[in-house]
Image (tube, rainbow, N blue to C red):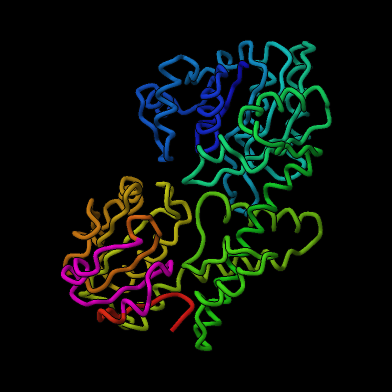
Amino acid sequence: MNITVIGTGYVGLVAGACFSEVGNNVYCVDVDEKKINSLKKGIIHIYEEHLEKIVLKNYNNKQLIFTVDLEEGLFNSEICFIAVGTPMAEDGCADLSAVFQVAKNIGELMDNDLIVVIKSTVPVGTGDKIKEIIQKELYKRKVDYKFEIVSNPEFLKEGTAVKDSMRPDRVIIGCEDEKTINIIKILYAPYVKNRDRFIVMDVRSAEMSKYVSNAMLATRISFMNEIANICENIGADINKVRLGVGSDTRIGYRFLYAGCGYGGSCFPKDVTALIKTGEHAGYIPNILKSVQETNKKQKKVIVNKVKERFGNDLSGLTFGIWGLSFKPGTNDMREAPSSIIINGLIDMGAKIKAYDPKAREIAENIFQNNENIEFFNDKYETLSRCDSLILVTEWNEFRSPDFDNISEKLKNNIIFDGRNQFDKEELNKIDFEYYQIGTK
């Protein structure tokens, strides 16, 4: 098929690359000329495992084309995906300005019948507005091209986005036109050939499904973090509680880990947008508001533990940070707990040494000109002459570190673990002062 993907962020670039990987001809369009030129040179602006390989392969095979010219991208296109960003506006609602501009441009430039697929995360009712915008432009042009609107929300997890694209848990199609549904099914058939994973519904329900999925996962995380804080106050161990709770097959173990809060581009933004959706409809979503508030507080838990141990004045102290991205497998630092922790410690007078296997460049841009933070390319060198180690992101390379090496580098054998990665009893045996979340 001939496909156009508008937007080359996490969603658009991964989708375009994966569609080309199974034989489709894909145009990836973006208004950012600098980004497009970088992609043409093989420079990938985001880190995702396997992404660079399939982008370079299919670009060289001319099945994946990057351009700033939407008219070129739409020429003879059968399906056009809208995958531009919908960031949080000042009022907490999703900012749909880019989505609506793209819809207008499609109406101005489409030169044949077209299926318009909304991949961006958008509030309920956005599909109807996009349809109105495109139709208005076609009326202006006095042309009678036919088009259908499809909601096809993405469920990619940053860090495993390529895998999630090629082997999705499910493919949700929001559409009521049978012919269009069948075409989208054919497009996705290579990814779901082992079993039927298609779920077909109306557009509004598909739009809602994405928000509810993210809000449910965010709720599990905040719930367990709240339980962890209770455990800490009453002398229980959240790590053991998780095993007891997760063994219930109705609950399961996923997203039951206590930690220093969730971040990223999706959960914070989508929970807030869903709250606003409820409020605009005349309903106050109290549970979601609590999820949001609990997460904000949780990002400060490590700072509070450091304060309890070292006092309010951290002048003259240096802390080694392991992990900057909001989760392992990505270089994304949007809404990352590391930023809250680092700024909190610096505000109390501390110096920071930091290491992340993928997010250093982004972190340097975030903290540019801040003399209180230094970045390293080696996790052990990061700890040299530090007063303690703070683990923030659970990258695999941090799971079984050399504790003798850590002890040699640190001034004090003190570890604050924001992801409960290590065995407390074992660390105590080798004379480490070890602080977890959800246990004394």
Residue found at the very far front of the displayed protein: 194
Name above or below for residue 389 compared with residue 46: below
Q: Could you tell whether 409 is left or right of 161 in the image?
A: left
Check residue 404 for magenta coloring: yes
Name the quadrant of the N terminus: top right
Q: Residue 206 at x, y = what percent?
A: 74, 42
* Residue range of the region highlighted in magenta in the rendering: 399-427
Q: Residue 97 at x, y = what percent?
A: 62, 37
Q: Residue at x 35, y 46 (%)?
A: 362
Q: Could you tell whether 221 is left or right of 425 in the image?
A: right
Q: Residue at x 80, y 55 (%)?
A: 281
Q: Nearer the viewer, residue 189 or 78?
A: 189
Q: Nearer the viewer, residue 414 or 5?
A: 414
Name the quadrant of the C terminus: bottom left
Q: Residue 134 at x, y = what percent?
A: 73, 24
Q: Nearer the viewer, residue 69 or 18?
A: 18
Q: Nearer the viewer, residue 389 or 280?
A: 389
Q: Could you tell whether 31 is left or right of 399 in the image?
A: right
Name above or below for residue 326 compared with residue 240: above
Q: Residue 52 at x, y = what percent?
A: 40, 31
Q: Residue at x 41, y 77 (%)?
A: 304
Check residue 271 for magenta coloring: no
